[in-house]
Amino acid sequence: MTLKARGSDNYLRFGIMWPNTMSQNITSRAVAEANPDVLDLRSHVVAAQSAESAGFDYLFFADTYAANAPANIAAGHGEPRLYAPVWAAALLAATEHIGVVTTLHMRYLPPVVIARLGANLDALGGGRWGWNAVPGAKASEHALFGLSEETDYERRYRMARESIRAVKAFWSAGTGDRVDVEGEFFGASGVLAGPRPSQRPYPPIFNPGVSPAAMDLIVAEADYGFTAIVDDLEEVAATARALSERAAAAGRDPKSVEIAGSIAVVLGDTESAAEANYRDYLDSVDLEAAEGFASFFLNSSSTYQRLFAGMSKDDQIRRIGAGAGSTVLVGTPEQVAERFSEIRTVTGVRQFLTLPFRWGPDEFAAMADVFTALRRRGDWIHPSERGWTW
């Protein structure tokens, strides 16, 4: 059994937003058709094994229940979509050390189901599983589950906190121990069949958001919040500082509560080759499919409005359609490594969740050159040398 102790060193960590659809991180039919068949298990297995060998720390399975809009589906963006706990189990079984984070929605799954799924996934991986605890608030998903109305923001986070606490109660119970939970939203009583999670006291918990309410939830019950690394690094630094300050105020070691920043990488043998590769990606974005996506970000985020001010509408759509507006590091492995080091220096963020446009064993193996350059800078060592910590 390989237990993954949490690391408090200063080395950088890298995850992959795992491809759970044909072109998950870019709204491009051309990229979708160039990628492996997303329903081919063997393609996922060899890609995951390549990522593990290269030095990635974890694979991250995002998920949603509702299909994307017709234009997105036509562009290969979001349909079919892999169900996170099923495919995460397959990759845990196919790898030896790398972590696998699985989205399980608290709004749609009762705590006892989450506790049982999570415990089995962690046992299957020998202590390598993490939970992306999503509050769940999409109107289209609510309709699928027959929920009549949206849950308001404050109520949603009260529900999330109660759900995580109930899951932890099941996870921490001994074999044969009875658990009694009675709260505002959830009630449960009885003895849950084993196994229990291999990681103690609990597997790591991620929360997808860094609003004040989300930060309060992360500090109280979780370990990681994730957000986009945007071009304005001071914006990212302010978010990281706010989370650390909340953690310290709550009596938690700020190093135990971290930001995982989503970011894309486009490599080339030369800087000009990398820039040409990136331009090809931008030119391949299906504008109709990406427009709704871009409108959501631009209408709901003052940060994105500021970052993309002055761009033409088409350029805004392309930029958000390729990586959802996250920073894209473009260059040679050495140049990209230098940028990662700079981002960590400016923001304090050491966890990066990479967003692959093209995916497969070759693409993930290519990141080994970035990691090697980071090693030379003293910012990274292979996970095998530090015990495969999160």
Image (cartoon, rainbow, N blue to C red):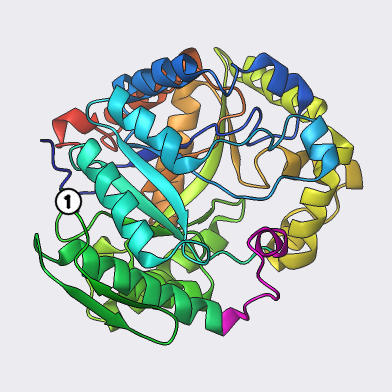
Image quadrant in which you'd find residue 203: bottom left
Evaluate whether residue 389 shows in this view.
no
Q: Does the magenta run of residues contain 268?
A: no
Residue extending farthest bottom: 184
Left or right: where 326 falls relative to 40:
right
Say which residue appears at 55% left-offset and 84% top-offset.
Answer: 154
Q: Does the magenta run of residues contain 151?
A: yes
Q: Check disc 1 and give the amino acid type.
A: Gln
Instruction: Decide: is 336 above or below 208.
Output: above
Say which residue appears at 9% left-offset and 59% top-offset.
Answer: 175
The residue tagged 1 is 199
Near mark 1 (Cα within 10 A), the count class, few <14, some 14-19 or many ≥20, is many
Say which residue appears at 48% left-offset and 72% top-offset.
Answer: 214
Evaluate whether residue 367 shows in this view.
yes
Image quadrant in which you'd find residue 73: top right
Image quadrant in which you'd find residue 221: bottom left
Left or right: where 19 falls relative to 72:
left
Instruction: Decide: is 262 above or below 125.
Output: below
Residue 81 pos. (x, y %): 61, 36
Magenta stretch: give its range.
139-154
Left or right: where 367 falls relative to 140:
left
Instruction: Decide: is 157 above or below 99.
Output: below
Q: Nearer the viewer, residue 64 or 339?
A: 64
